[in-house]
Image (spheres, rainbow, N blue to C red):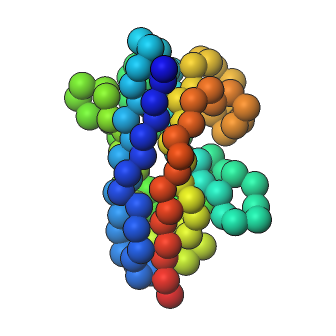
Amino acid sequence: QVQVVESGGGSVQAGGSLRLSCVVSGNAINPHYIGWVRQVTGKEREAVAAIYIGDGVTRYADSVKGRFTISQDNAKTTVFLQMNSLKPEDTANYYCAARLIYGGDWRFLGDYSYWGQGTQVTVSS
């Protein structure tokens, strides 16, 4: 049984910061990428950041580049999404997802095999 568990969501005013955490465990899976995906109610999910577990290479959507930072701990058991300079348009449910496929477009959501339940981030103006 694979578990993906996010934490750290909440409410913040515009310009503030939040840090999300994600732990992927179980069944000896070895994901190549861990990604953060967000979904605004009524809209499609959008991949905002991903990290390659092997060497820590990161990827970002243009909408969050320079404001969000994805990282992993030294044990490579937890992935973080540090979100700074938050804007009201960042309000969404944020999901952590594990991608077992190496290569291809990190933004393609169909390649993510395991998903968490999501954590809500609300940014007020």
Image location (x, y in percent) of residue 58:
47, 37
Quarter holding residue 56: top left
Residue 106 against residue 120 in the figure, above or below:
above
> Looking at the image, which residue sits at the far front?
1
Residue under the point 56% across and 59% down = 93
- Residue 66 in sight in this render: no
Image location (x, y in percent) of residue 100:
57, 19
Quarter holding residue 16: bottom left
Residue 14 against residue 99 in the figure, above or below:
below
Residue under the point 53% across and 30% down = 98
Foreground: 114 or 85? 114
Image location (x, y in percent) of residue 42:
76, 65
Residue 52 against residue 87 in the figure, above or below:
above
Number of numbered discs: 0
Quarter holding residue 17: bottom left
Relative to 94, 25 lies left or right? left
> Looking at the image, which residue sits at the far top?
28
Relative to 80, 44 lies left or right? right
Foreground: 93 or 75? 93
Residue under the point 44% across and 81% down = 14
Foreground: 10 or 2? 2
Residue 54 against residue 122 in the figure, above or below:
above
Image location (x, y in percent) of residue 52:
47, 27
- Residue 116 in sight in this render: yes
Residue under the point 66% across and 64% down = 40
> Looking at the image, which residue sits at the far left?
74
